[in-house]
Image (cartoon, grey):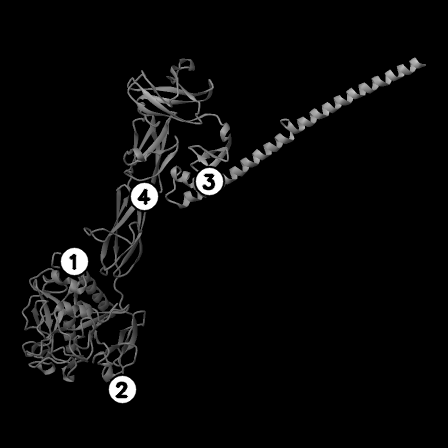
Amino acid sequence: MYENKIQSLRKEKGITLIALIITIVILIILAVVSINAIFGDNGLIKSAEKGKLEHEIAATRERLELVLADAYTEKHVNEKYNQDEFLDEFIYAQEPDAEVDEVEISLNGHTFELDRSVPELGDYIGEAGNLPPTIRKIEVIAKTDTSATIEVTAARTEGVKYKYSIKKQNEGDENYTQETTKNENTNEFTGLENTGTYTIYTAKVELIKDEKTVDEDTIEILMGKLEKGVVRFEDGKWDNGKASVQILTDKEGYRLQYQIDGIEDEKWIDIESGNRITGLTAGQTVYGRLWNGIDESDPASFEVKDTVNPTISEIKEVEKTETTIKIQVVAEDKESGIAKIEYSSNDGEEYTIGETATATEYTFTGLTELTEYTIKVRVTDGAGNTAELNKKIETDEIQKWDGQSNDKVEAVVSDDEVTVPVPHGFVASKVTGEKTVSGGFVIYEGDTEVNDLNVDNEITSRNQFVWIPVGDYTTMYTEATATLAGGTGVTTNVYSKLRMRSGNNYTITIPGDTSGIREPDIISSDSANYSILGYISEQDMANKMIEEYMATYKSIKKYEGFYIGRYELTGTVKNPTVQKGTVLGGNWYDLKKACTNIVNTSYAQTTMIYGNQWDEVMSWLLTTGEKNDFEVNIDSNSWGNYNSITRTTGYSESWKANNIYDLAGNYDEWTQEALESGYRIRRGGCAPYSGASYPASDRTYTGATSNMGYFSSRPTLYIK
């Protein structure tokens, strides 16, 4: 029994020991699992460290991206921006602890790729202290006929050696020669072939650290010249006035570049093969080359040409009047585009452009009624090619006034039942004796009525004119072409038909003929005095003279009459008037300027009286019976201020004819008639002399700059 107890105790003891061992094993297993869960590669500590690192990387990326976002904005608003020094300084200003090189940026021990061209952040490279050496760039820095020196730019090169070798491009890797390993980042390869065309070598660089290659790269080296034709231009074409051309190459390992109009080292522009060079104009030359930083191909060239003339399909007649022709041109140029459209209205006449160089509409002005004009159009494209087209167009006839009020005049019926065109800005007189055409129909400037009650005040304060009816304008004008004197070449299509009294022996000629009297025309003193009239040259004076003359002619033809100043010229040169008062004396130039400045509105214009208008007034006095031939052409003493001193104009009612004062005597009155090469004509006689010697229709002359103290003038008024 005792032995049985002993055996039982031993049996229990054995079981306890086994359980203990099992327990220990389980505890060990649990401990290993726990340790691995905490300290293993995927354990809590490692995961925490990894999370921390990822957070740091993300935070660093965010900081750098904010900086580069600001730099991107700066790029588009600051003209001083560049992707090199400016960008570096901009980054350092916001992140002083950053480290920046050509393609990488580091902050807080973390390194990222950097694209400077945008600028923007690229992929995460790694922790700054653990990154391997890297080759950034290899370039040829020197060459001779048989040697080439390369330079290596690398990052993180501490403890690194450079291993160099070279082979011909088309040989296998087993043919690398001139192997050398050294600390320097430059190496010269010698004994290279140069056959006069070209040979391409491949140079290899390896970075060696701890006797292992940690990075390698290659560069192609050209010895000799690339053959011609490696760069070519194709598919040149025009579009909307601009040309483009495709530039191509089949060679690899080179930068394809171009520039326009000339070759300068700093002006080459990189371009991808197959892309188009756009925005070209006729006459430009585009150059292209291959370049690897030191070697270049012979430049290819492409000349931008346009040999096709523009086309003019039509000259459209838009509208015309008796004095204007408006046209529209239909033209096109599908190559270099239309650069200029010019217009001319007669053979030999100089071309001119419209409102802009390419305006397709043009209005010819200052034309003569019922005249056929050869309208010429010349179109020039961007390359200087031209096209011309002509079309004959005849002007309309001047339409006589219909007797109705319009935007220029009010139709007023006189007491003798004649409809008179009173220009806006004037009123017809209501004064007794001033309301008939046959007796002198008077108008006053202004809007206030003039009647028997206020007339005494109005005649000294308002400009006044008298209507002169013209039954047949051809008694005043010859419609023919003549060229003015003075060498300006200015022509007129109409000139005055002057009438000479029997007592005068002057010869009547046409403009340009300086042997007699004519109108309109230039005289010799005009070349030195045109500026008094506000003209910029004698040529300008001649042109403006014809414009004024033609405007008067057209108005007389349309309205069948004109207005003459009721009084001799009064006021001052700067503030001229035509009213009862002190007469304004002076030379021809000052008084012509004064006459022009009395009235200038949208409705009417004053000018110095023309000789043919004076003749028409004399004829009208005879026609109305106001005066007879003797009084007008032989002796005007009975109705003018002669053999006396000059007086204010309107001084005496007996010196009035059909409501016009001082046509006879008082002051000699300048007209626009020219005599010979250097004189202007005066009409009407003057106070110091006899009316028998100088009657109202008489002509006398002197130089246009003269002023004898009794020289004045008289304005006329035409309706525009």
Kindly report which numbered mark, 3 or 1, lies closer to the viewer in this rendering.
3
Residue type indicated by callout 4: Gly
Residue 620 vs 388, above or below: the answer is: below
Instruction: Give the residue type that dot 2 points to.
Output: Leu
Outermost residue, front direction? 2
Q: Are marks 3 and 4 in contact (CB under 8 Å)?
A: no
**Element type where label 4 sits in the image:** loop
Specify which label sits upstream in the sequence, 2 or 4: 4
Residue 618: give x, y in percent of width and height: 14, 75
Residues at marks 1 and 4 touching, judged by CB atoms closer than 8 Å: no
Mark 2 falls on what kind of element?
loop
Q: Earlier in the sequence, mark 3 or mark 4?
A: 3
C-alpha separation, residue under disc 2 versus residue under disc 4:
71 Å
Earlier residue among tags 2 and 1: 2
Marks 2, 3: nearer the viewer: 3
Viewed as shown, does residue 399 lie left or right of 158?
left
Q: Position of residue 707 (x, y in %)?
A: 9, 71
In the picture of the structure, the residue carrying the numbered disc 1 is: 539
Measure the alpha-carbon separation of dots 2 and 1.
50 Å
Alpha-carbon span between mark 3 and mark 1: 73 Å
Disc 3 is placed on an element classified as: loop
Q: Which mark is residue 51?
A: none
Q: Could you tell whether 23 is left or right of 589 in the image?
A: right
| Residue that label 3 marks | 95
Q: Earlier in the sequence, mark 1 or mark 4?
A: 4
**Measuring 32% from the left and 31% from the top, which residue is drawn there?**
288
Tag 4 residue: 337
Identify the image quadrant of residue 76. top left
| Number of the front mark, 3 or 4 | 3
Q: Secondary structure at mark 1?
A: helix
Q: Which mark is residue 453?
A: 2
